[in-house]
Image: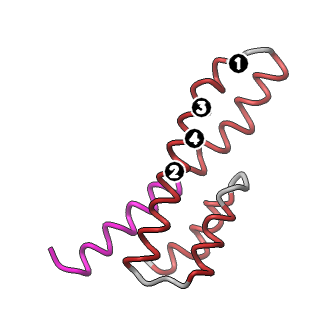
Amino acid sequence: MSEQKAQNQVSALLRMAAIAEGTTLLLLVFVGVPLKHGFGIAEVTRWLGPLHGLAFLTYIWAVINELSLRDQPRGWAAKAMMFSFLPGGTFWFFRRSIAAKG
């Protein structure tokens, strides 16, 4: 496999991880938490919490992979991680930074 092809795969992993992390955080914050605290339905957060945790860890791993394989600046990685804490932040960061480089 060529080096360029390997770099594109990492970028695809980062895209998928960003979408998964952003989607699960939005669902957790805007669906799961209101259902739990407003209506007493905690089952949604029992499933979404661990799912989001897995998506978050995958996203952080993908950012670190991208940092090492594509030689991104450290500031880029810090921003990528920082935006993952904001609902919808990974979508904004993906649109502004990741997609422009891929």
Q: Quadrant of residue 71?
A: bottom left
Label 1, label 4: how far apart the Cα atoms are: 15 Å
User: Looking at numbered disc 4 in the image, what kind of residue is underneath it?
Assistant: His
Residue position marked by numbered label 1 in the rendering? 42
Q: Callout 2: helix, strand or loop?
A: helix
User: Looking at numbered disc 3 in the image, what kind of residue is underneath it?
Assistant: Leu
Q: Callout 3: helix, strand or loop?
A: helix
> Which segment did they paint magenta?
1-20
Label 1, label 3: how far apart the Cα atoms are: 10 Å
Which secondary structure class fits the magenta region best?
A: helix
The quadrant of the picture occupied by the C terminus is bottom left
Q: Between disc 2 and disc 4, whose residue precedes?
A: 4
Q: Between disc 1 and disc 2, whose residue precedes?
A: 1
Label 3, label 4: how far apart the Cα atoms are: 6 Å
Q: Between disc 1 and disc 4, whose residue precedes?
A: 1
In contact (CB < 8 Å): disc 3 and disc 4: yes
- Please tell me whether mark 2 or mark 3 is closer to you in this view: 2
**Residue occupying the far top of the picture:** 40
Residue 32 picture location, percent across and down: 70, 29
Q: Is residue 81 left or right of residue 37?
A: left
- Please tell me whether mark 2 or mark 4 is closer to you in this view: 2
Q: Quadrant of residue 2?
A: bottom left
Q: Is residue 76 above or below residue 40?
A: below
Q: In the rendering, which numbered label is found on residue 48?
A: 3
Q: Is residue 27 left or right of residue 9?
A: right
Residue at screen point 66% across, 27% down: 45
In contact (CB < 8 Å): disc 2 and disc 3: no
Residue 74 picture location, percent across and down: 57, 81
Residue position marked by numbered label 4 in the rendering? 52
- Please tell me whether mark 1 or mark 2 is closer to you in this view: 2
Residue 83 picture location, percent across and down: 68, 63
In contact (CB < 8 Å): disc 1 and disc 3: no
